[in-house]
Amino acid sequence: MQVTKQEHEGRGRLPLPLPSPAVDRVAVEARAAALAKRSIKKQAKRQGLELSISMMDLTTLEGSDTPGKVQALCRKALLPDASRPSLGPVAAVCVYPQLVGVAKKALGDSGVNVASVATAFPSGLSALDVRLDDTRRAIGDGADEIDMVIDRGAFLRGEFNQVSDEIAAVKQVCGDVHLKVILETGELGSYDNVRHASDLALAAGTDFIKTSTGKIEPAATPPVTLVMLEAIRDFFYRTGRRAGMKPAGGIRTAKQALHYLVLVKETLGDDWLTPDLFRLGASSLLNDVLMQISKLESGAYEAAEYFSKD
Amino acid sequence: MTDRRDPTAERRRPGSVRIGVKKTWKMYIGGAFVRSESGRYLVTRDGSENYCRASRKDVRDAVKAAVGAQSGWRKRTAMNRGQILYRLAEVMEARRSELEASLGRAAAGQNGNAPGGSDAAQEVDAAIDRVVCYAGWADKFQSLLSSSNPVAGPHFGFSVPEPVGVVGILAPERPSLLGLIGAVCPVIVSGNTCVVAASDRDPRTAIAVAECLATSDFPGGVINILTGSRDELAEPLVRHKGVRAVDLWNVDGEQAKALEGFAADNVKRVQRRVFEELDWYDARTEGLGFIEHFVEIKTVWHPMGA
Amino acid sequence: MTIKLVEPEAAASQNRRQGERRLNFGDAWTYAPAPESPDHVRLQDRYELFIDGKWQAPSSGKYYTSTNPATEASIAEVGHAGEADVEKAVAAARKAFEGEWGSLRPIERGKYLFRIARVLQERAREFAIVESMDGGKPIKESRDFDLPQASNFFFYCAGWADKLQYAFNGRSVSALGVAGQVIPWNFPLLMAAWKIAPALACGNTVVLKPAETTPLTALLLAKVVEEAELPPGVVNILTGFGDTGAALVKHPGIDKVAFTGSTAVGKQIQKVLAGTGKRMTMELGGKAANIVFADAALDQAVEGIINGIYFNQGHVCCAGSRLLVEESIHDQLLDKLKDRMQSLRLGDPLDKNTDVGAINSKAQLERIKHLVEAGEAEGAERFSIRCDLPEKGYFFPPTLFTRVAQSSRIAQEEIFGPVLSVLTFRTEAEALDKANNTFYGLSAGIWSNKGSRLFDIATKLEAGVIWGNTYNQFDATSPFGGYKESGFGREGGRHGLAAYLNID
């Protein structure tokens, strides 16, 4: 059952739209595809690519992650391309909780944030206490941002109160630490559900909504991102508050990154074209962006072996 | 009760005279039999009876009735319209002697033309069969005129026939029964309502048909029949903006030019055809092509997904 | 470039009122100019008339200049055909109909049309550029809509040529003869395709008159007809003005008139042809209702509204020019709509990122301005987007009116420009009443998440094309045409063939 407005506001939260607006699949996909046709050339492309670097959450979320791997990634985050020291740094490095300390140490006070997945990532299927503790520990180790997952099972069986309460609980633990709520849209089954889950998360007080863990296909897609941006837009209209967006998973090319920036620019406008309100979660995107920048400068197409693999 | 007088004896007395009751053949508007608002009348060709001479205002009233009947008639199911048409055939069969007699009297009124009782019977046969034919069309023409449109995109699209609305009909002069039935049935079967200016030559038969309609299950206003001068009624009928389409039978030359010019004032759909009397007996003068002229094709799109 | 800032005072103050909860579509990240290069498009300085397979000078020796409405620059001279040229063209079409074309096997006719479709695909880029230069529409529309649609239309009709015996439930069919066709300036090439392809597939020959302001792609199409080696006289293209079209439609040698254009001219043609027995199809004006219910997928409805009225600068007969909004969501929808309008990019039609191009002609721009003034004078509240209008050329900013009365001119007359009139309703019945309260009946849109309501209203709307939860969709397979004074006859699909055939 969906929470009623009275119930919801009675708990001191922001107004929830009742019900979430419908989403038309064909039209959303058509709009997202139309925006993919924007022609981004020359200085617009250069500016867009640099912007995308500044918005990147450089991510490693493998079972095989080690301090060595994370340290290398942090160096890449600080200085993406040694031959172009003006590029970067990225917005954040995103790691598992156990590696937060390593990342924090490597990044120091560079301004690059440490983001940690938490709450029994990627399934979220642990007791709430465990998930909250997971969050506390990550924050205690120095995480500046927490990427939590929602319990998709609870959402899909209609336990919307539970999903909402859990987000609120994590946010309470986070305090001023930035919270991103991962909806894992690839498991939600429909744009209507994506929209509803976005509305729940926004009303429960999250700072950001995020598409995916990267462990499930499909991960981020332009239409899913558009639906979430629309939820953020309505939340802004309703409350005046600007929430952020993070598509993650499957974003590998500069062209895709620019497409996401176009989606943001034409859905939410200039105010969201900042790392404070838009992030790209990616592991391999950075090199393609660097290759494109190099191509813009030299006019020659690049090859992968000229760029560091971290 | 010992007085066993024969009650009919008086009438059987040799030399007694009975005065017949003459009927005024009233027009059929909105399901009611009415005189012309103008009070004008004409005399049937055999000189025996009076009928109404409709005016412009009768046209107005008839169109109003037809407009009023529109939404109800088109909303009936196709099956129901078919059953109502079939009921008309039943009623006509039951009243066939009257229809035959009416046709015979009209023929008798024509100078030098033999009444030809067998011709009248043949025409009634054909007319009833035509009604039966269209009764069967009521729930079939849609699938033949529709399409599912395989559009090149993530949409579902289909096109279906819908009634045009109110249709004005200038019925053919002859054959007065078969021509009237053959013109009206394909118009109303799809959900249109109509106003008919009946044959000048034989208004009596048109009203005999109206009496069949009135005793069948047709809702009032679906078919409205005016009598009088077809030429006089043509202009107000074709110029009426509530009329969406006109069916002009055996109109030609200058009159055709004038009427079609009026039709252009509100982009009316015009069907103008010239048939010889015997053409109406041909099976090619019934069917889908006749229904098709008085439907609109509506195309509907909806997203479907890839 | 000098910049004119266009924003009426009322709209500006309204923007300020809603202040902080409005989105900001500024220049934090601007797209660099991305013009489609017209370099490889080679246009002649002058085009003759295309009659009987030959390029022939107009008998009068008169030419006029077709200009680019975005720059006001001349593009090319084209002939002004007169009665003598119509005479020649109709005679050529007749000769072809009674000769080579008429005796051709149907499948061969079809193959000619397939050829045309293919050449159009191959030359799509060039055609798209010329279409945008001559008519002012954004290149993204000519590239992604007009050209594919035109080519698809030929491809679709081509396949019918040898299957006409199946098209009408076994009824026998035959060609009409010579068709005289007059088309408008909003989709110049596509309208030519809508006219020529079915006519030829059905075995007719044609004389086509393109609109005076957009003759070029029709002339390029004549070049394609040459390239496809159609027999002479099958397709004749006469450029010119209203007098050319008038001479064509009243010529006694044609068997059929197909007209797309304004309702006023359509009526004139219907009058001229009264009593002649000539076949006609009319695709005329519209004032479509786009009805949005509170349960609609609102963000997609906003896209549909935008597409419905600002597609092709609103130069669309089926444009969703009357927005009927359920009153309970009026304010919410209007906020969204205004923000979305503000993100529209107006400017150079050849720029690949342009959403709204140039108004087709100076005369049309004047008409739009006149009706917008009428709307303001009648007390409706105007909102136009803030944008820079190019100094040269004919441009008008996307505009909407709220507080529009059903009785006002902007709610009744076809503006044929980027101007939306917003009205409200409270119940389904009221929505339907308002939607049908017009002598037009071309199209309508319905936005609702409730299937039964959508189909109920679709059935009750008096319009030939109903878009449910979408708008401005077209397809070669899909019949298009109006109810009431929006015309009669259908174009596209199986139904479209009936316009060019005698059917027993």
Image (cartoon, coloured by chain):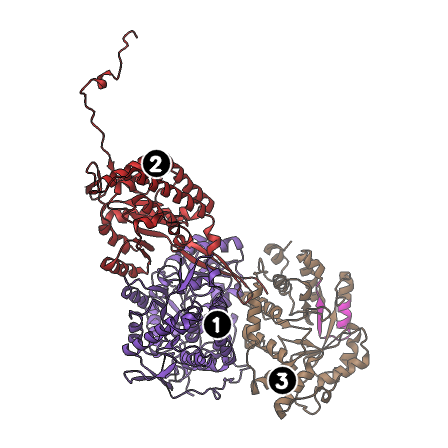
Helix, strand or loop under label 2: helix
Quadrant of residue A122 within the rendered picture:
bottom right
Q: Nearer the viewer, mark 3 or mark 1?
A: 1
- From which residue to which does the magenta span run? A134-150
Judging by the rendered image, the residue that carries numbered circle 3 is: A50
Residue B52 highlighted magenta (yes or no): no
Q: Secondary structure at mark 3?
A: helix
The residue drawn where x is 49% and y is 75% is C117
**Any part of residue C468 in sight:** yes
Q: Which chain is purple?
A: C
Mark on residue C108? 1
Give the letter of the red chain.
Answer: B
Residues at discs 1 and 2 both on one chain: no
Dot 2 falls on which chain? B
* Pointer 3 and pointer 1 on the same chain: no
Say which of marks 1 and 2 sits in front: 1
How many C-alpha atoms fall within 10 Å of the one at disc 2: few (<14), some, or many (≥20)? Answer: many
Say which colour chain A has: brown
Which chain does the numbered disc 1 sit on? Answer: C
Q: Amino acid at mark 3?
A: Glu
- Disc 1 to disc 2, how far (Cα)? 55 Å
Question: What residue is disc 2 on?
Answer: B96
Q: Type of residue at label 1?
A: Glu
Mark 1, secondary structure of its residue: helix
Report if residue A138 lies within the magenta region.
yes
Mark 1 surroundings: few (<14), some (14-19) or many (≥20) residues within 10 A: some
Label 3 – label 2 distance at C-alpha: 91 Å
